[in-house]
Amino acid sequence: DQQVKQNSPSLSVQEGRISILNCDYTNSMFDYFLWYKKYPAEGPTFLISISSIKDKNEDGRFTVFLNKSAKHLSLHIVPSQPGDSAVYFCAAASNTGKLIFGQGTTLQVKP
Amino acid sequence: NAGVTQTPKFRVLKTGQSMTLLCAQDMNHEYMYWYRQDPGMGLRLIHYSVGEGTTAKGEVPDGYNVSRLKKQNFLLGLESAAPSQTSVYFCASSYLGSNSPLHFGNGTRLTVT
């Protein structure tokens, strides 16, 4: 029973264009959401987060949008750069202390 | 500051053997986590700890045990390894729990033959 789902295993975009990564969740108790980025042979690194009391959070080229009614969040990267090529994981947290991850989306940004 | 350090980096086990994976953090974090990463499955939570002396089950705890005797260390044990436990294991820590960013180690690649 996957509580956090990333339905697109991969995404390819051209350098300079927008990358949109999507994530859906099923548990309405989740109240904090995060995106992590992972390069091969390294651990994931934190990218950006959003609390359930907000619907948007922006940090430089990265923006996360949260639609609570649809239980959906998305990560926008504008403009995309070749160095953004990595696996992106969304994650959701509740007050139990658990952090549940999605399956990941591999982003390839072509020069 | 080393952050989160996992040892060993690689290990090959035979079915039925046991081993312990060690995670150490030097950031004085209260919360620590063990995840496994498998193709198409993402990161799945095995066990976690909300403080020294505490442990709790995650999504896939069967076949694993953990201990948090010291705040800075979180050990993951496999008592009788199975091929299904072939995976990359990641340890993470955070200061305020799941509502704050996790800091991950670089992983341990385990193969069970």
Image (spheres, coloured by chain):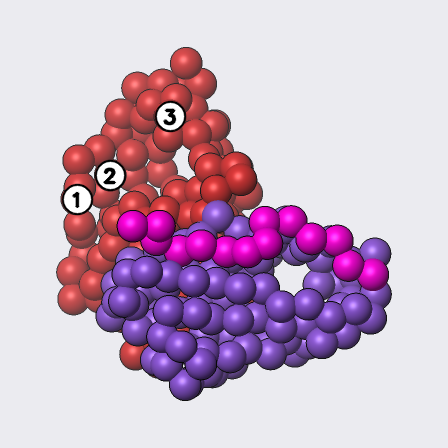
- Give the image location of residue B95, x and y in percent: 26, 67
Is A65 included in the stretch rendered in magenta?
A: no
Write down the residue under mark 2.
A62
* Distance between the alpha carbons at the discs numbered 1 and 3: 19 Å
Amino acid type of disc 1? Glu
The quarter in which the C terminus of chain B is drawn is bottom right
Q: Position of residue B36 (x, y in %)?
A: 57, 60
Q: Residue at x 75, y 53 (%)?
A: B12
Callout 3–callout 2 Cβ contact below 8 Å: no
Tags 1 and 2 on a common chain: yes
Left or right: where A49 falls relative to B10? left
Sequence-earlier tag: 1 or 3: 1
**Residue A80 location, quadrant:** top left
Which secondary structure lies at badge 1?
strand
Q: Residues within 10 Å of mark 2 (few under 14, many from 20)?
A: some
In the rendered structure, are the residues bearing label 1 and label 2 in contact, judged by CB atoms less than 8 Å apart? yes
Q: Is residue B9 above or below residue B82?
A: above
What is the C-alpha distance between the residues marked 3 and 2?
14 Å
Q: Give the chain coloured purple.
A: B
Q: Residue B102: give x, y in percent of width and height.
A: 34, 59
Determine which residue is flagged by label 1. Answer: A58
> Which color is chain A depicted in?
red
